[in-house]
Amino acid sequence: MNFLTPEQINRRTFVTRSAYGLGGLAFALLAQRSLLGAVPAELPAEPGWRGALARPHFPVKARRIIYLCMAGGPSHLETFDYKPELARLDGQAFPESFTRGQQLAQLQNTVLKARGPIAPFSRHGQSGIEVCDLFPRIGSIADELCVVRSMKTEQINHDTAHAFMNTGSIIKGRPSMGSWLLYGLGAETENLPGFVVLTSKGRNGVQPVSARQWSSGVLPSRFQGIQFQSQGDAVHYIGNPEGVCQSTQRQVIEEIMRLNGSLADETRDPEIATRIAQYELAFKMQASVPELTDFQSESPAMLERYGVKEPGDGSFASNCLLARRLAERGVRMIQLYHRGWDHHDDIVGGMKEGAQAVDRATAALITDLKERGMLDDTLVLWGGEFGRTPMGQGTGRDHHILGFSLFMAGGGVRKGTVYGSTDELGYRAMENVVDVHDLHATLLALMGVDHLRLNTKFQGLDIRLTGVAGKVVRGLMA
Amino acid sequence: MVTLRVPIVSLVLLSAVASLRADGQRPISFNRDIRPILSDRCYLCHGPDEGTREADLRLDLRGDSALAALAPGHAEMSEVVKRIFSTDPDEVMPPPESHKSLTPAERDTIRRWIDEGAKYETHWAYQPLERPAVPAVGESHPVDAFIVAKLRAKGADLSPEASPERLLRRLSLDLTGLPPTEAERAAFLADRAPGAYERQVDRLLASPRFGERMAVWWLDVARFADTVGFHGDQNQRIFPYRDYVIDAFNANKPFDRFTTEQLAGDLLPDATPEQRVATGYNRLNMMTREGGAQPKEYLAKYGAERVRSVSTAWLGSTFGCAECHDHKFDPIPARDFYELQAFFADVKQWGVYHDYGYTPNPELKGFSNDHPFPPELLVESPYLQTRDREARAALLAYVDGLAPATREPAFPAWRAETQAWLASHADGWAYPELSATRWIKPRALDEPPLERAPDGALQLGRATKSGEYVRLVLKPAAGRVASLRVRLEGVPYPVSAAAGGFRIMEIEHASGERTTRASLHFAEANHRRPRYRNGYELDGVTYGWRLPEADPGEPLESVWVLSEPVDIREGDELRLRIGYDMAGVVRVGVSPLATLDPLDLVNGRVRAALAAATDSATPQTPARVAGAETAASSSPTPRSPGIDGGTAQRLLLETWLASRTDDRTRRDHLRAETARIREMNGGKAWTLVTESAPPLEVRVLPRGNWQDESGPVVLPATPSFLPGRRESTPERRLTRFNLAEWLLSRDNPLTARTVANRLWMPFFGTALSAVVDDLGSQGEPPSHPELLDWLAVDFREGGWDVKRFVRLLVTSRTYRQSTQHRPALREVDPANRLLAAQNPRRLDAEFVRDNALFVAGLLDLRLIGGPSARPYQPAGHYAALQFPDREYLNSEPDEQWRRGVYMHWQRTFLHPMLVNFDAPNRDECTAQRSASNTPQQALTLLNDPTFVEAARVFALRLLQGPAATDADRIDRAFVLAVGRAPAPADRERLLAFLQAQERHYAANPDDAKRFLAAGVHRAPEADALPAPALAAWTQLGRVLLNAQETITRY
């Protein structure tokens, strides 16, 4: 393992710490902290965390991830996996040879009928990737995409499927992907959280999502995702109390830090130096979050390009633009949930509405990153927690875990590619199957991390994002 | 403090000599030196798990394969030694690709161990529990004897005792989660008599705050939460279980009874309600009602979670690993996992709490996302009973206070009018002409109107369909309409579980061209099935009336009180939009009266009151005492019209006020008081309990796969690797009670070790074995194994007496020493595991809040127990929750400042203050919280309205207090916040800070006004103070409430 010893970490934080303007006393205390903190499974608590890995295991292709999580499970059959044979069978009995003995969700004990794709597909760009016509703008950047048509997962209900997609396990307390990245690699910002979550909501097929999905689990809580809110303070408690201006707030913080300094003199408790630094950091966040969420500096053309109607309205479009701003500021993991893909009914209306909500902003985000030269080291991931059945369910489709699609773009992925395939009815991933652990292993590898070597002890066990499974899928990498 | 000092040097020498071999090296101990290496590097392939075992070599036991590979006594011949020292990458063990390579020192240790004979020892935690001798080091307290013996071996000793003020604050925070009051502090500082400290210990152990403090620990272990956790994360009703835990600690219920009642209280002979409430423990696993979820899959998840929770809670073992395969490091076979699970196979539960078409659950017919999670038990809640009594007394007092109003001329006039009206309306209601047609918005269906009976009643005909409603038009005579009566007859019984609803969706008053909407205040029926919203039962039938499933044998009667009475002119219409799920005959009446209990208008009480009241009567106090039969004006059951004069007069007064439109203040107050009484639900509450059902079949699931039915069926049995195994036979299936018996038996060494180890943690910072949820081989051998065993035996033999155990810990010198870590010891013991000083401990989340509110004088300590409270929470925190959508309403002042232990625990979106201070969401058993130090904590203490409000109330307390000068006030602020006076330099600086803040707020009065408005606490005396001063002191309060010393116990 290439974990830093506490002493090494301390040496590194020593250098970065000067930014916090601590006095000599605090420095001396921090130096001792590393010795005192030698309790198993305890990590140094200093804010300038640079990550548990001393150096990357592999060449770093991506420095950050923007995960556009299409919560609810968008249909692969109406996005990236065109199945003419399914179209032909539309309305007829679904061949039993496919479904015998398989787990179904709401379609249990019902007559299974094939439902053809509800919208046509077109080929795009040099690569000729087929994308559903509901997503013309994503289609227009097909040559940037690496589409995976052979995903499979293990969990068929939303809650557990999200948990599996985020943490590689359904056991509670497992850290989510963003927490792993923050723990392993640290962040490139000290004024913003290193792992940020944004949520938006469609009109159809909306399912709840739990804060458990961005929990740090058994890792210390400072590695948890921080959810930005679309009403009230962008981050909980980031705003000063009413009637307290920035300068009075500063005076209060200075008094707190001074008082803590006196206590440090007396007690020699090493936590105090950390606490002083955290107040400094909190104050900086209080300034940097409003700057981040203020879209004044974005031109009307830029807002139009993403389709932002009202900056900060909590829409997917606004969140995409915010994601780009977070990426620019060094946030390691930015996860956007768009709740609106659970189309048990009215998949025709639902897909149309969902596509309208995300197509433009997704494409704008990727091209915007590219124009800024950031796509090279930013990995964009688009996909749901599972796919949907090729069998109809009323006017919609049920959950499906044996085959579905997602795409990646940017940071080290093979562009203009389709990887893997499902059978002729889109039921089961057949060729180059990628399971969730493989996806995680590959994402980590693109970030320069060997999934077998990023772990933490919990209840005496080494736990990992990929559990005991997962293999890096070279075919997805440039 | 006088201590017995033994010359350190000689002790060090002695102990060192005793443990040295001739060559100057300490003999190898398997448990101390070898097991950690083998477990971490070798067991994965050469350990307990048969599935991953390589080369048939098993090193966790001294079996044939191990003996052959080790060659005890002859390292030079040992294959193990050869392999671990090999430089050939194909041969060396562990293989390089495992990333588990041995260090040179570890290789040497293994070689020496083999040379010394490769002796194995049972893993420390599984060894039989025997009481070790207390080291004779001249310490009278056993804890100190063990600690000091080890310290002296390292040339160290305990630190001096902490200062009395720090010590009392420490003790008080540790035992009650609250700091001492000023009076308690003064009393302790003045108490010079021997035993002063012990008296404080006894006082605090006897305080009811002790239970609230200890409960936090156990509620984490028991994964107590207010919501089910999966998917929609709906509310579950279980607060009486929390009360049970608090009461158990306060009553010092022995831990063995505490254990048995939670696991098997329902199986005890003549189980009491309390014992059944305790079984809520078995129901605290997460649950789902997600559409598409499969019951069998979720029952498997629930079952597996229970094994993890029980094994962590009582055995300190990680059984979770054995769900899919034999444990890699500990001798836990997968079969043990399922045998343990089988104990709970009788716990009645549904995999998916709904009656979906794809998986019918007849018992849950009609369930929605708003329904609770049965089985539940209705129990008495002392908290609600007290609140109920208080609310009834408050209503009574208020009404009695209004008695003079009856002397206003309007009152007798109204009474006469009412009497006349009732005289002309035989059953107390007017039945206006009505017509009814079926509609689907925006127009009437092309169907004939509903049929009318000759007496004015209406045939409902078929049930209304989705989107359809019946438009009922009433033409009342001129006059006031304050209530509607709906009486149903001829309902074709039985009605199905999903059917039987009657709803008034809209009421319009059409007067000439003008149409205004009227709303309902409250409606009640004589017979009804409960209705729920967000898991809680709704009062009355305002939002819809669900008829009883069985025919009650009398007419179904309901009264719907309007929010505002409507004054009808000649020709006006009342248009009702109604819907219903069954046929029948309905009769609709109107009345100019409104009563607090709507049913008083159909049970004859109003008429009786009119008859009983004399002209001169005013309420005779105390004609009614607060109690069950008196002001039960919210009871849905009609009562006898027999009524005394005082009661009659009060009822008339209430009715008069409730029926008026010109005195909303008094009417709304009456309504609010009545609603509060209803909220208390007659002092009763529902709670999840364990009900025993025929046990489900439990199989070993290969790789944990619930769809794989190839594994053997298992019956309940205790773990095979632990002593005293108990197994079911086909004739006699063991029960949860038998499991509890074994957990607490002398055979099982783990329960006492686990609990004693864990109870050490809150008082010393780190447990004796630091990984409190894993006493297995991947955990940590205890720093003081003999002390842990001594404590475990003492706890068990002492009758599992928790208070006695805690008292033992906190009366030690070890506990009482200063937290100042001496630089000289850092080399020897960097993590202070030998305890040459106390460890500072940041308060747990709930106590960060409690402490701040207590310092401010705002904490509500009036009552123990009760439903969860909802402190201020940022808006939109539940925006991503649905099924049903969630709205968070802050508790009112009567419950806003309750202790953190009572905070609403939403598993998927825990309160951000709790999250930021490391409270677990309690999805599963949590034995240890982390103690992080983050900017989010700073932001919470700085900006969360709870803390801003507390700072203001703190300021008010200081400004109103006895202190004469600002400097004195600062001194008092320090004493309140951290239990000591400030250093002179700190006092000076804060005085300057105060002046600067006061100047600022004097120059910015608007800011001061906004700043002082935080929260819902209102104090008239605050308005009398100059705003700039109060604002400045509030800022000072914020400084102190944020200080590290305030949130830490030193």
Image (cartoon, rainbow, N blue to C red):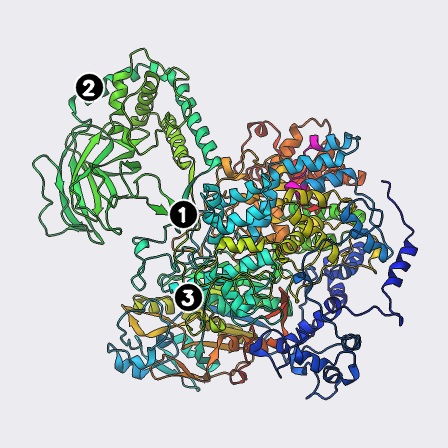
Of the pair B234 and A232, the residue shown nearer to us = B234
Residue at the spot of label 1: B376
B178 vs B664, left or right, is right
- Tell me if I can see residue B922 in this picture: no
Of the pair B306 and B684, the residue shown nearer to us = B306
Q: Earlier in the sequence, mark 1 or mark 2?
A: 1
- Inspect the image, locate mark 2, and give the three-letter code of the amino acid beneath it: Ala
Residue B720 in magenta stretch = no
B481 versus B299 height, above or below = above
- Inspect the image, locate mark 3, and give the three-letter code of the amino acid beneath it: Glu
Q: Earlier in the sequence, mark 3 or mark 2?
A: 3
The image's mark for residue B674 is: none
Q: What segment is highlighted magenta in the picture?
A: B173-184
The image's mark for residue B297 is: 3
Residue at the spot of label 2: B420
Label 1 to label 3: alpha-carbon separation? 23 Å
Q: Whole-percent x and y of residue B165?
A: 76, 38
Same chain for the residues at labels 1 and 3, yes or no?
yes
Q: Residues within 10 Å of mark 2 (few under 14, many from 20)?
A: few
**Circle 1/circle 2 CB separation < 8 Å:** no
Label 3 to label 2: alpha-carbon separation? 67 Å
